[in-house]
Image (tube, grey):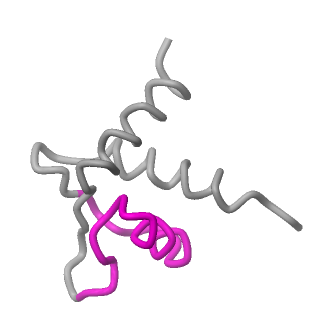
Amino acid sequence: MKYDENKIDEAVLNLLYLNTDKHNNTWKGFDWQSMNRLHEKGLITNPISKAKSIYLTEEGFNKAKELFEKLFCT
């Protein structure tokens, strides 16, 4: 099945945003390919580490917030 990787990345970014704390820290329990692409786009810190969480960059947080409001808010 073909799918749009950018749409998958946006969905993962939204789920990361949903679970961020006040420091933009969130658990990294999502598909590794998506996580790596988000890191390559500069939206999250490097997911390849022993830590169980990552941080959304300022750009990643702002993009995630914008997408979240667009997709899920009334």
User: In the rendered view, does 64 fall on the left or right side of 27?
Assistant: right
**As drawn, 39 above or below 17:** below
Question: In the rendering, at what x and y percent does residue 22 appear?
Answer: 11, 43
Residue furthest out toward the right: 1
User: In the rendered view, does 68 fall on the left or right side of 59?
Assistant: right
Query: Could you tell me which residue is drawn at 22 percent across and 61 percent down?
Result: 55
Quarter assignment of residue 38: bottom left
**As drawn, 58 above or below 69:** below
How many marks on residues?
0
Q: Nearer the viewer, residue 39 or 14?
A: 39
Q: Quadrant of the N terminus?
A: bottom right
Query: Could you tell me which residue is drawn at 29 percent across and 47 percent down?
Result: 19
Query: Could you tell me which residue is drawn at 68 percent across and 62 percent down?
Result: 5
Quarter assignment of residue 57: bottom left
User: In the rendered view, does 1 fall on the left or right side of 10?
Assistant: right
Q: Is residue 68 magenta?
A: no
Query: Could you tell me which residue is drawn at 33 percent across and 77 percent down?
Result: 47
Question: In the rendering, at what x and y percent does residue 56 appear?
Answer: 27, 56
Question: In the rendering, at what x and y percent does residue 26 appear?
Answer: 25, 58
Residue furthest out toward the top: 74
Residue furthest out toward the left: 23
Question: In the rendering, at what x and y percent does residue 48 appear?
Answer: 33, 85
User: In the rendered view, does 19 fall on the left or right side of 34?
Assistant: left
Magenta stretch, residue numbers: 26-49
Q: Is residue 29 magenta?
A: yes
